[in-house]
Image (spheres, coloured by chain):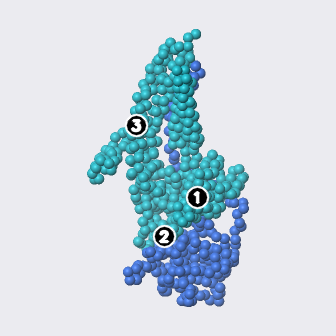
Chain colours: A cyan, B blue
Amino acid sequence: MSTQNEFPDQPMDGGRAATSPSTWSVIKTILKPLASLQVSVVLFAMSLVLVFFGTLAQMEDGIWTVVSSYFRTFLVWIPFQLIAKFGMVFFGVSPDAVWTGSFPFPAGYTIGIAMMINLVTAHLVRFRTTWKRSGIILIHGGMILMLIGEVITGEKAVESKMYLQQGELSNYLDDSRNIELAVTWTDEDGVGRELLVPGAMLKQMGSLSNDQLPVDIEVLEYHKNTTFVETPDLKDNQDTLVFVSGGRSAGVRVVIVPSAEEAGVKSERDDAPAVKVVLRDKKTGDELGTHFLSLWQYRNYNNRLLIGRPHRFTADGRTYDIELRNRRVYKPYTVQLDKFEHKVYPGTVVAKDYASTITMIDQERGDQREGIRIWMNNPLRYRGETFYQSGVLPEDSGTVLQVVNNPGWMLPYVSCVVVTLGMLVHFSITLTTFLTRRFVR
Amino acid sequence: MAFRTWCDGRLACVVLIALALSGCGKPEGIREQTVPRIESNKNAPAVVEGKERIIGVIAPNATPAVNGWFFFKLRGPAEQVAAQLPAFEAWIESIRFEARVRGKNAEEIVTWTTPPGWKQEEPAEGDPRIAVFKFGPDGEQLDCGVSTARGGLLDNVNRWANQQLGRPQIGAGELDRVLQHRTIDGRNVFLVDLTGPGGKGKVMMMAPPHGKMN
């Protein structure tokens, strides 16, 4: 039986040959343009352009704003002003130049999905599935895994922080990238209760009237970022905060003011959004108070440096607290910081090592484990989450742990191993073929 | 070969469907949740009760380049402190913060009205406090005065709690629970009310005296 392929431009694939040739031909005709190598080159070029403009955008915008606007979406409107700014640095464009308008460009998800389709269809239509191409197949398979991993991470991963001062117990995590307006109270049984309005609803401003809320909330202002300035007034208002530590700053009183978004190229902190809200009685519509709430007033965001008067209101005979905070996720376990170590290189203030020793109290499992040490590059993995040593509270008073829940955490490692294996296989095959030919000659 | 084609096609479909579904999700609305109880450490030391009590107000000092705090403190046996609580309340409510300019330097001073039954005196030599108060026979063991100091709020609270009352150090994480928020003369201040077995530590402050008696 001849082993030659009677259709040399078609893969030697008995499976496809088993399908009706007309059906497969139709499928192939449809998929062939998608599998084009020219399309691959164009997509790679577009990804370079997208990364270039995404990098330029971080001169003004925060890193996570750019990630969500340029990469984790399908379409981005790129301002012409970015090109002007690039020109100001390299081509002598006037520093006063203002280029208005923007142009649409495929964003990360569009290019990524297109690359995935191009790669998969190329394997279906163009590539021959032979052992000689096994290395290429492995490499491409690893790249597909990497792309899938990024989508899973982008959509499902949650990065949170846990702030603990020495001896403190905590059973919740702060989602660093999301905020919520929290209305809290203690019920008749002494149980803490919370009503939470997500940040996305606050951004839309306007009235929030909901059966769950004890009052109607009108959002008058939303500020993406705020900062603080020292107040010259002897009298405080409800928004005045005071530094409780921080060396010579202790006792300094500050007020919160709107500010520009933290730029990605120089950001040292996440943005601190703020809202101005008016609370109204549900029945009468009477105003119960106006509150300017900033994330700076949230103890974890300000690293426990600032304290202000709690914002409170009374409705139907019950007193409520209201604050803007990072989205809180309660956990079925409690963590206590037993000891925090901060070592510096001798003679410097440069950090050499941070380490936190904690006790994990798992009420759900009835288990308590002490002496768990978390230090740089040595995280704790517990209940599907990974606890990293992330930062330190002022004056070494405590620790900041970054807690990551990422169902796709294994995929980048697996994809790197697969790609590496594919490269080794491909190199070995190519080398063997070369040596064999040379030997035969 | 048929199997390979089957795999290729199904894999492509799974990948595309997974990508398409990955972005789906309902926007989050208003939610209600119960705050779970924080479990305590089974091996934590027992809470210390005591016979001595300190009640005081800690107020930010707005003197530029000095800052720090003003302290208004009443200390002594718990029952004697309790007897003076109404007078203490009247005293702290009478506190006023004033800006003064001495030469080129602005500074803030505090004034107050001495409650009936209290006698204000000049501090003894070496006592850096602004003012001290004496009481009648029922309050012979009470110590009350006004002072200023810098440093972190926690350090200063622990001066009272640990050095003077003999309590274990208050952790930074517990500070919120120890402080009560008050407003006096438009200034946000902190009220601290603690008891303990009594300590041996003395108050050491370095700030020069400011202030005046009404």
Label 3 vs label 2, nearer the camera? 3
Q: How far separated are the C-alphas under marks 3 and 2?
A: 49 Å
User: Looking at the picture, which amino acid does disc 1 mark?
Assistant: Asp
Task: From this view, report whether residue A429 is shown above or below residue A298.
Answer: above
Residue B41: x and y in percent read: 69, 60
Tell which circle, 3 or 2, labels the residue nearer the N-terminal end: 3
In the image: residue A78, left or right of residue B52: left
What residue is shown with label 1?
Answer: A353
Label 3: few (<14), some (14–19) or many (≥20) C-alpha neighbours in 10 Å: some
Q: Residue at x 54, y 18 (%)?
A: A13
The numbered disc on residue A249 is 2
Q: Residue at x 48, y 73 (%)?
A: B187
Does label 2 lie on the same chain as label 3? yes
The numbered disc on residue A46 is 3
Task: Please name whichever residue, B92 or A346, is drawn nearer the observer in this view of the structure.
Answer: A346
Tell which circle, 3 or 1, labels the residue nearer the N-terminal end: 3
Q: Residue at x 40, y 59 (%)?
A: A258
